[in-house]
Image (tube, grey):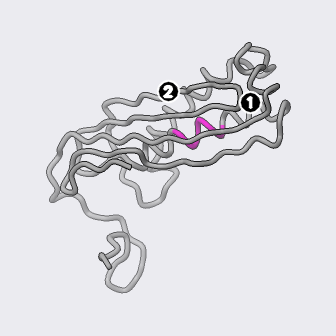
Amino acid sequence: MSVLTHLDENGAARMVDVSAKPATAREASAAGRITMSAEAASAIRGGAVKKGDVLAVARVAGIMAAKHTADLIPLCHPLPLSGVTLDLHMDDEGVTATATVRTTHNTGVEMEAMSAVSVALLTIYDMAKALDRGMVIGGVRLLAKSGGRSGDWRA
């Protein structure tokens, strides 16, 4: 079993010191999905949700979440992000969110990509909950990462 890097020798939580790691180009992609009734999906697609343009707001919320991941997840490093894209694909049963985050820094951006997806999906739920309280968010996962000492990884 590998050593857990967020625990010190006494088992206490700690932030990993990445100062000795080289700054390299790093990228991570994540995805997740929210499923909903056909009526809710139709309303979102047709711009008929009273709170406004659901997908536009969700995209901005996801980008903001990537930028604020260190404020949300206690042991994450604050990172200067060089790019965040958030794609939202709508179909008759829901929305699939895919985020890609980039930086040139000493640590990766996997958590930023997953935060972007999660908050985008939560925003869709918030804006459309009056239409369907039974929406389900799931499948949030890392799709790929590149850069850093551990190299490239794909799901």
The residue carrying mark 2 is: 87
Q: Residue 113, how many percent across, how many down?
A: 43, 42
The residue carrying mark 1 is: 127
Q: Residue 56, how many percent across, how many down?
A: 60, 20
Disc 2 to disc 1: CB gap under 8 Å: no
Q: Which residue is drawn at 85% across and 32% down?
A: 130
Which of the two labelled residues, at mark 2 and mark 1, occupies the earlier sequence position?
Answer: 2
Identify residue type, mark 2: Asp
Label 2: which secondary element: strand
Question: Could you tell me how far apart the alpha carbons at marks 2 and 1 are, in whole angstroms?
Answer: 18 Å
Q: Residue 133, how many percent across, how many down?
A: 83, 40
What segment is highlighted magenta in the picture?
Answer: 117-122
Q: Of helix, strand and loop, which mostly describes the magenta segment?
A: helix
Identify residue type, mark 1: Met
Nearest the camera: 52 or 12?
A: 52
The reply, left or right, for residue 75 in relation to residue 145 is right
Nearest the camera: 22 or 93?
A: 93
In this picture, is 134 found above or below 62?
below
Q: Residue at x 21, y 39 (%)?
A: 25
Q: Is residue 103 magenta?
A: no
Q: Which residue is drawn at 37% across and 86% down?
A: 10
